[in-house]
Image: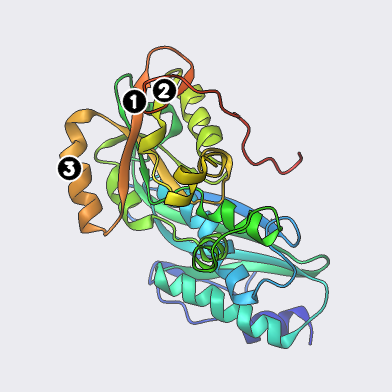
Amino acid sequence: MNEFELIQDYFNWPIKDPSIALGIGDDAALFSLKDGEQLVTTTDTLSEDIHFFKDTLPGDIAYKSLVVNLSDIAAMGAIPKWATLSISLPKINHGWLKEFSKGFFKCADQFGIDLIGGDTTKGPLTISITIMGEVKKNKSLLRSGAKINDDIWVTGQLGMASMGLASLQGKLKLAPSLKVKCIKALETPSPKVLIGSHLSRYANSCIDISDGLIQDLSHILKASTVGASLLLNEIPCDQFIHTSKKYQFALNGGDDYELLFTASKKHRLSIEKIAKKTNTAISVIGVITQNKTLKIMDQKGKSISFNKKGFDHFA
């Protein structure tokens, strides 16, 4: 089997979006944007033994490869539409490809994405995906819009995925039921696409949490030239973290793929209504401050010390 047959057999699925004039099979794809919309695009690369273990199920690898990009699209307040997939394979394994393809299109169908192109080659197992989406002109959410006295919000729970990773690495012992939940959060996270597409009406800034709460919040603070004060006890995480005081998983762990955003206090009720409508758990965990520093306060109102470093590919 050559690379063209591989693409035809596993990745040339029917196109559903009528805005796509040309998909897989030519030198490039052709598609149209709606009037008044801007194109949003993001790319992520996942490599074996860096982003996933060798024995991770191929369907889960495919699913997560899409999710990490979808989370970026959600953080921009955009709606995902199209994807390209480039994959480097050490060899052609039909069983692996069948399951990978199934996982990829399961996720793509769930979020309304069409695969319109990509590339295949031989080499270490590496998956690179680009997702493109649409957002109304001048309505995208940026890191640079946070305003003093904004509420700081997060979706979901933090720290589950990093606990799952530590458990698989033999660095953390968890109860069996919690371990299962944490590994699921690591291998098949849930991107907050639906609530993200509604936030542009109310949020001033947004980022997805992929490298840890502290590191990703620091990107907003730097881009917006502001500071922040967080309440440790308000950060949503499993009771195990509160009980064991292992807050590093929620603060620095990464792989959460939740949304971190800021918004004026006057929009609290509207944001809570959107969260209810989209069935999304949300929490206010702090406030944007004028002082260009980041502080974390314990339940007694005392500032605590913390590690500012999140995930680093080259550490």
> Residue 270 — which label?
3
Between discs 2 and 1, the one toward the N terminus: 2
Q: Is residue 146 above or below residue 124?
A: above
Q: Is residue 144 above or below residue 129?
A: above
Q: Secondary structure at mark 3?
A: helix
Amino acid at dot 2: Ala
Dot in front, 1 or 3: 1
Location of residue 45 (image quadrant) = bottom right
Badge 2 crowding class, 10 Å Cα cut-off, few under 14, some 14 to 19, many 20 or more, is: many
Q: Secondary structure at mark 2?
A: strand
Viewer-side residue, 79 vs 314 = 314
| Residue 89 coordinates in the image, percent (x, y) | 78, 71
How far is disc 2 from disc 1 in space, using C-alphas? 6 Å
> Residue 228 — which label?
2
Amino acid at dot 1: Val
Between discs 1 and 3, the one toward the N terminus: 3
How far is disc 2 from disc 3 in space, using C-alphas? 23 Å
Q: Is residue 275 above or below residue 216?
A: below
| Residue 135 coordinates in the image, percent (x, y) | 36, 48
| Residue 181 coordinates in the image, percent (x, y) | 49, 65
Q: Is residue 218 left or right of residue 28?
A: left
Q: Are discs 2 and 1 less than 8 Å apart at CB?
A: yes
Amino acid at dot 3: Ser
| Residue 289 coordinates in the image, percent (x, y) | 37, 17
Query: Is residue 274 in view?
Result: yes
Q: Secondary structure at mark 1?
A: strand
Query: Is residue 32 in view?
Result: no
Between discs 2 and 3, the one toward the N terminus: 2
* Residue matched to label 1: 287
Query: At x 53% / y 81%, what residue is drawn?
Result: 13
Query: At x 42% / y 35%, what residue is drawn?
Result: 142
